[in-house]
Amino acid sequence: MRLKRSSLTGKRSALLAVAGALLATVLAPPVAAAPTESAAATVVPIQTTGPTDKRFNLVILGDGYTAAEIPEFRADVEKHMNVLWSIEPFASYRSYINVWAVEMPSPESGVDCDPGLTDARRDTPLDMAFWGGCNANSVQRLLTVDTGKASAAADLVAGTRSANRQIVALANSDTYGGAGGSWATASGGNALSSLITPHEIGHSLGGLADEYDYYGRGVPGGIHTGGEPNSVHHTLLTEEEMRNKQQKWWRWLGEESLSGGRIGRHEGGMYATKGVWRPSKHSMMKTLGYDFDQVEREVMTQAISRKVDLVQDHTPNTAPLSTSGNAWVDTLHPVGGALDVVWRLDGRTVPATYGSRSLDLRRLRAGKGAHTLTATVTDPTPFVRDPKVRASAALTRTVSWTVDRDAAARHTDGTAEFTSHTATGKPVGAKSVVYAETSHPSSTGPSPAVRWTLNGWPLATSLGNDRDLDLAKLPLPGGRTHTLKARIAGTGKSLTWTVDATAATGAYELSKPVRTVRRPGKPVEYVYDGPFTMKLSARDDQQGSVVSQFRVNGDGWYTYYGWPTDADKPWLFTPSGTNVDDLVYGKLGTPRVVPWDDATPEYRTHTVEYRTIDAAGNTGPAKKFLVTLTPPQG
């Protein structure tokens, strides 16, 4: 078992119980990659969504896990991934991402200088270390890795390279820590560790800056003295100046933030307390536990998308196409919504194609001579508002062909087959997009049609696009699973998925109140005159870990992880919050993050909501209760 570091420990039994599910792929083509070994390292495919060279590859390395502790590494990866998939834009674009774990049994357990500079140096494959590599001039939470060794380990995943992968190194430690850069690091077992990973990927992949208003814990960051920051989510401009100059996050101003509050101008960031402003009160880059806000999400959507090509394959365009043939494109398939396809001939939109991935060229009625045919694939995601981002190669791709009715017709024939599809081995969520791509065996006839059924009943697909089925548009009854099938028309070839239409069930357990008030038609109310605890739990009828979240008074949803010092301890609410290593947790009412935030107790009634997000991506309905905090008597 993992060596315990200071007070930051927690039982691992719940994670170990689901570790066996780790090796199953979540979204995969028909044939998943098999584990490979090199020397003492083993590469295990966690999620395979497509060929390595056509996907963004997340490579997770483990350091300081002995051979006996490899199950702990698998459990850490399981938890980190399920939390990642609960956060946008990773939830919507998980089908763009392959996930690989590189298991490297360590001669010794743990990592260097954990938790202090005088603690042992350990013999581990990646030489991970706290204190910025055991540097007395650094900070304890800065967790580093030998980048050369990390790159060599990641190279064991065939087909990955710096341009198409992100390395995350997990240390066998329960101490809080991590780092972001070309390589992201996080401690594997700290209560907050699964939230460190998306934060650090925000640095490494998205180039996002910290929104902390301090550098050293417990020490206010002072006043920002530089000019306008290059960071897209920091500014010196007022809201009016942002609108007038159409700069920074002016397109999002005034909206309710995904991470709570309103998108506006909130002071503090880039390690300064004053003189610089950020978009929202709290977000992933300021306070672990919240989502990325809209400004950060837009950046991350582009960052993920530019690691792949929206067009995965297309009709060869090295020679002119005959007008007696057909043209096609195979696209990517975001879980959060289908891509758009528009066909144009000589710059004019071909009417009534309705997003079809193939086009019968006979309908073009092209005149004599050469013509230019294009298919433009775009991502219509509402996560992006900047036209430059939407027009970038990350979200828009165009394929061109020359079409000539006098060109020689290509005659190729073959057998229609499924070439890629949403994985069938695990249930899919009731709000996700399921896809099935086929081969294109004939150059003179239309591409094979895909027909869909749900529980045996035929389904109508979107006009023109029969490759994607958006389950969110179907009135799926909850409380049960459903059987979804896709078949290639005119053949006996089919695929079957189980649709999980039932969200996980969440529950709460509170410490004993002064009294409990129950009113007809109202949420139950608990009255406290001081601190109290809340433990959230979840139960699901499917395999995979469940993420629990809560929010207070309609603020941003916050991922429940237990308590910072122990994942098994319940969340502690107090009138002014609890200082843990110079960060403040659990203030009832307006959140307090650092010691200099307002600590004024809010003696009133508060609304606490809670919900779940299961492994299939189903978000359960929010339920709530009331807590009334009364002032001390006397």
Image (cartoon, rainbow, N blue to C red):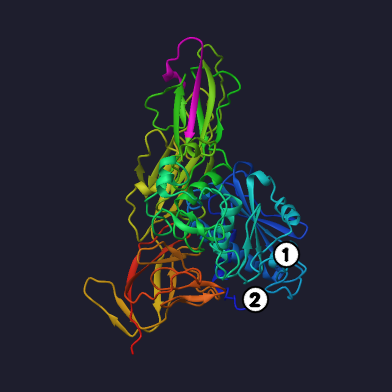
At 51% from the left and 10% from the top, the residue drawn is 369
What is the quadrant of residue 540 in the picture? bottom left
| Label 1, label 2: how far apart the Cα atoms are | 17 Å
Q: Residue 374 in magenta?
A: yes
Q: Residue 471, image x and y in percent? A: 39, 48
Q: What residue type is labelled 1?
A: Gly
Q: In the image, residue 586 lies at what x, y percent?
A: 45, 73
How many numbered circles does the render carry? 2
Q: Residue at x 34, y 77 (%)?
A: 603
Q: Is residue 41 visible?
A: yes
Compared to residue 313, the image places residue 130 above or below, namely below
Mark 1, Cα crowd under 10 Å, few <14 / some 14-19 / many 20+, is: many
Helix, strand or loop at label 2? It is loop
Question: Residue at the top extreme?
Answer: 368
Q: In this view, does 250 lie to the left or right of 443?
A: left
**Image: magenta residue range:** 361-377
Image quarter where the N terminus lies is: bottom right
Q: What residue type is labelled 2?
A: Arg
Q: Name the residue under label 1.
A: 133
Q: Is residue 27 above or below residue 328?
A: below
- Label 2 Cα neighbours within 10 Å, binned few <14 / some 14-19 / many ≥20: some
When the figure is inspected, residue 510 is found, relative to residue 589, above or below; the finding is below
Q: From the viewer's perspective, is residue 160 above or below residue 141?
A: above
Q: Mark 2 points at which residue?
A: 5
Percent of width and height locating residue 107: 77, 69
Residue 160 shows in this picture: no
